[in-house]
Image (cartoon, grey):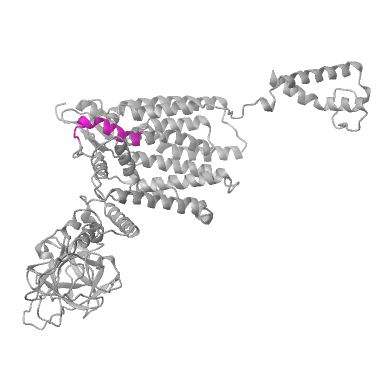
Amino acid sequence: MQTFLKKLLVFHSNRFKTMSGELAGSDDVDAKYNPPDEKPKSSRTANGLAQDIHLQKVEKKYLDHQPRSSDTPPLSMNVELNFIWLILIGLSFGTRMWRLTTPKHVIFDEVHFGQFTNFFMQNKFFFDFHPPLGKLMFALTAYFSGYDGQFAFADIGQDLGEYEQLVWNLRFVPAFLGSLVVPIVYEIIIDLGCSHWAAALGGFLATFDNMLIVHSRLVMLDGPLLFFTTASLLCYLKFHKESKRPFTPKWCMWLGLTGIALLGAYSTKFTGIFTFITRELTKHIASRVVGLVIFPGILYLLQFYVMFAVLQKSGPHDDMMSSAFQASLEGGLAKVTLGQANDVAYGSQVTLRNTFGKQCWLHSHEHTYPVKYPDGRGSSAQQQVTCYGFKDVNNWWIIKDPGRDSLAIDYPPRPVHNGDIIQIVHGVTGRALNSHDVAAPLNPANQEVSCYIDYNISMAAQNLWKVDILNPDGSNIWKTIHSQIRLIHVNTSQAIKISGMSLPEWGFHQLEVCTDKSIKQTNTIWNVEEHQQNITYPEGHVAEDEVNKTEVQELASKPMPFFTKFWELQLKMLESKKELANEHTFGSRPSWWPLMRRGVAFWIAKDTNAQIFCIGNPFVWWATTLSIPVYFGLLVLYLLRRRRKVHDLSDALQWMLYACCALFIVIVLWGFHFFSPFTYGSVALSSTEVNQRKWLNTWGMLSHPNT
């Protein structure tokens, strides 16, 4: 009724103005309005005037019943409910939250992320090649759950026992974030310009894809990564819509949220950086540097600051980091090196660790290089020098003054300075570190490094090395642990380094050591890790403590600047990620993904075929892959036909498409149900039933014999 009256008032408003103007003798008359079925205003009849007066009364009565602006509540809002969106939310949370502790065992990579959570609870340092955001979320959940870090997470299949509630809490994190992926997909499709029904279909497919559900129900990083990846795309689409109104509050909000979501994706897994790279972002990076670079960068640093603040104790992965990094942790190397002298002197006994390359120490043993290599090249046949990945007595060396024959340390000790020329003598065999113009065993372009054996032939010793300190302090003295040095061969001006390649059996598969003309490499950087000084004090001298209590306390855990620690960890993470880029047991080729040719067995029960097998809904994956060429084919076909004025997308054909979509939805639901025993691990199938679901030979579902 109100709508009808509004239209009626609008339609007759000009008539009312005209009549009022004539009666008042006013010139303010709308001469443009002249309804076609009526006479001119000057010849209005009494009936026409009466109708206008009646209309005026109706208008007054309508306005009297409308609430005045002062009657409107000051804090009011209109709410619209999208029931399709709410249904998708319910289905998404239902499929991902259902029986989260089923199976009641440790599944697949929960072994790793459960142990990482334990290390957080115990304040022990650990190494992982992904940034810490996802692990921090698990640790925060465990902290608020009152968890003490005592559940081992030792093996796949370990019973949860009394820690079932804890594992539910940990699995809740990826399940909650994974559940939000479905409504985000719905909103993305809407913002791409599609209809609500198309968005509903997209959200439906995301809801009932078995692989997405598996990844969202376990203590792994995939659920958070999916959430941040889709959220970053949605925020960018919202931001792009506001691009015509820059610097408005909404523009700034969506820009900031895009940066935060991208940071979340990158901080969960390094692969999140490939979420999307667009020309628009590159073109306007200057105007968006705060929202997409500085602010996310600060938050990225913040998560590592929190991580270092929590993980202050020595842990199982210390040895992957540099000696200085390890010395900043309580226990571990700091405990081993407690009380050792800080200045390296002539006569010092040291171990030399490669600082940034693979974890290993300069090493030698009595075995010599083979006289001839398999490729026909000859060697020096002198004592092997390698880099050994474990602590060993053969890792110890003595720093010798070339001008003296004695290996003993003086009192007071004479420190080695930056630029000094030294000899390095192997502690066990007594032979000096040497290099000469002989090709290295595995890298002929580099020179061999050996411990010199005097065979009384024309090959003289070349065993002088210059100490090049890369980070000298004010004293210019070679420091234990913290001084990063290069050993430059005096005769050839080449630096000693590890090549990263393992020697064959004659070298006990230890890492090759050689010299290289290219000095500025990370593999040429070394540092002293352990250090001993056996000082012979003068007669009658009472030896004082090597360090006082204050110095002992300092050496027990020596702080390392945050940014130095942060940068070292970033380099180590990238290096480890690159090493893992090779094929592995659970890897798959990108060409296999569209047809889902590979699945991964996460867990199987000991006595039954109840299992978690990570595989998607085949109808979702295959239909999605097929839809891409079909869509573009139909697009080209109908564009060509419309260019020829042929509009043949009739109502009947549209209803056929709707019917096909309905049938497809039923098939997807059936596929979800058919493969759900592999999704939840709650049903023990027989071997025959498992084989019935192995539609491709490359799907490696497991089954016990005689089941």
Residue in view at x 49 percent, y 53 percent: 290
The quarter of the image holding the N terminus is top right
Q: Position of residue 251 (x, y in %)?
A: 55, 45
The quarter of the image holding the C terminus is top left
Does residue 106 appear in the picture of this structure?
yes
Q: Could you tell whether 91 is left or right of 412 in the image?
A: right
Quadrant of res 678: top left
Q: Position of residue 145 (x, y in %)?
A: 29, 34
Residue in view at x 86 percent, y 31 percent: 30
Q: Could you tell whether 239 is left or right of 164 in the image?
A: right
Comparing 38 with 491, the one in front is 491
Comparing 212 with 246, the one in front is 246
Q: Position of residue 701 (x, y in %)?
A: 23, 34
- Disc count in the image? 0
Comparing 597 with 648, the one in front is 597
- Verify whether residue 91 appears in magenta: no
Q: Position of residue 154 (x, y in %)?
A: 18, 40
User: What range is drawn magenta here?
Assistant: 157-175
Main SS, magenta region, reads helix
Q: Could you tell whether 359 is left or right of 189 in the image?
A: left
Q: Could you tell whether 416 is left or right of 31 in the image?
A: left
Quadrant of res 344: bottom left
Comparing 238 with 541, the one in front is 541
Does residue 377 appear in the picture of this structure?
no
Note whether 314 is above or below 412 in the view shown. Answer: above
- Verify whether residue 159 appears in magenta: yes
